[in-house]
Amino acid sequence: MRQISTISDRLAEQRIELPSWAFGNSGTRFKVFAQPGVPRDPFEKIADAAQVHKHTGLAPTVALHIPWDRVDSYADLRKHAEDLGVGIGTINSNTFQDDDYKLGSVTHSDDRIRQKAIDHHFECIEVMRQTGSRDLKIWLADGTNYPGQDDMRARQDRLADSLHKIYDRLGPEQRLVLEYKFFEPAFYHTDVPDWGTSYAQVAALGDKAMVCLDTGHHAPGTNIEFIVMQLLRLGRLGSFDFNSRFYADDDLIVGAADPFQLFRILVEVVRGGGYGDDGDTAFMLDQCHNIEDKIPGQIRSVLNVQEMTARALLVDTEALGAAQRDGDALTANGILMDAFYTDVRADLAAWRESRGLPADPMAAYAASGYGASIIEDRVGGTQAGWGA
Ligand code: PSV
Ligand code: MN
């Protein structure tokens, strides 16, 4: 196995993007729990996200969701972020909370509704221009609940047509990432259910269109690292939405449910050139903290990703390659497991200190008093929730 000292510079290449919606109140369809001190607007969400970066050095950008994060001046929002040491990242569109979209958005058979959904994406591209964002992320709730409800093939054609119109609007440095999800909210068929469909759609658009892989959007038992390998091999892994799931789209803290799976995914990311300065793959989190404190929840999340990245970087790839060429399954598997079982926490604490960061970011945040100050300051106004 490699020594931690050999991966020190590689660790410094880690950049994880936080979702603005993780800082608002969230819950399930049964109950949304209010938390004192929760942000009341996008400016306060960014201030909270900046705390995560301040204590970890790992999270330099924040993704926005439109219309939840609509503001009068995106230039002001961008300046606010930069003043706090972070930038604005991916812009997420939203075509799932308007009555018009009950039967679909960019796949809808009604030209008026379809154009409305396309226009919404044009608005998002304009926001990107003002925030300096690279990526437009599209996740669609489109699908049907009953066999025969609609013509799946025609919907696929309308999807392709709408995506073309959106793609054509992108600037030269901008990208479109299309996220897939195998079910929910539609329960019979989803119009972008899997990586193959997302890949087929984006490959037809051009080089600036990529796939977004949300780790929670697969059937139980799916070999996600295989998909990661394949998309990197095809040059189309645009971004991750990291989170954990036990059952379906649970949106729990990344690495909480299955740290080994996160390790296996990161091994393929590193192997495929998707990590750090080598790669173009965005490491986003897509999580909803329903019962835990938001800011420490995000700190824990980025530390989990860092820990598994460190273990993935420790894999002795030369020895592994030799064992694979020899057909020595036990040695090859042992080499991978050695890296997985390495406890890197003390080394990472030392690494942080050597870079002027707190050895223990969770403790540093707790000691900072920020949590108590926002509870005091943010009395009154409407608290932001998952949908605002
Ligand atoms: C819904 O499943 C979802 O979590 C998607 O993963 C999106 O990325 C996210 O909402 C925000 O739109
Ligand atoms: Mn997602």
Image (spheres, rainbow, N blue to C red):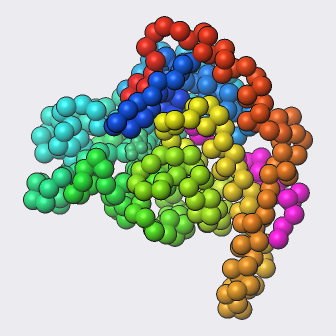
Find out whether residue 351 is within the magenta segment.
no
The picture places residue 352, in percent across and down from the top left corner, at 83, 42
Residue drawn at 66 percent across, 14 percent down: 373
The picture places residue 34, in percent across and down from the top left corner, at 47, 24
The picture places residue 39, in percent across and down from the top left corner, at 53, 20
Residue 60 located left or right of residue 40? right
- Occupied quadrant, residue 317: bottom right
Residue 54 located left or right of residue 73? right
Find out whether residue 7 is within the magenta segment.
yes
Q: Please determine whether, in this image, residue 256 is positioned above or below residue 292.
A: below
The residue segment tinted magenta is 1-20
Please state, as top left, top right, bottom left or bottom right, where the N terminus lies in the image.
bottom right
Front residue of 344 and 71: 344
Residue drawn at 56 percent across, 55 percent down: 257
Residue drawn at 55 percent across, 15 percent down: 76
Image region (quadrant) for ligand 1? top left
Residue drawn at 41 percent across, 50 percent down: 249
Q: Please determine whether, in this image, residue 168 is positioned above or below residue 313.
A: above
The picture places residue 29, in percent across and down from the top left corner, at 33, 37
Q: Please determine whether, in this image, residue 375 is positioned above or below residue 21.
A: above
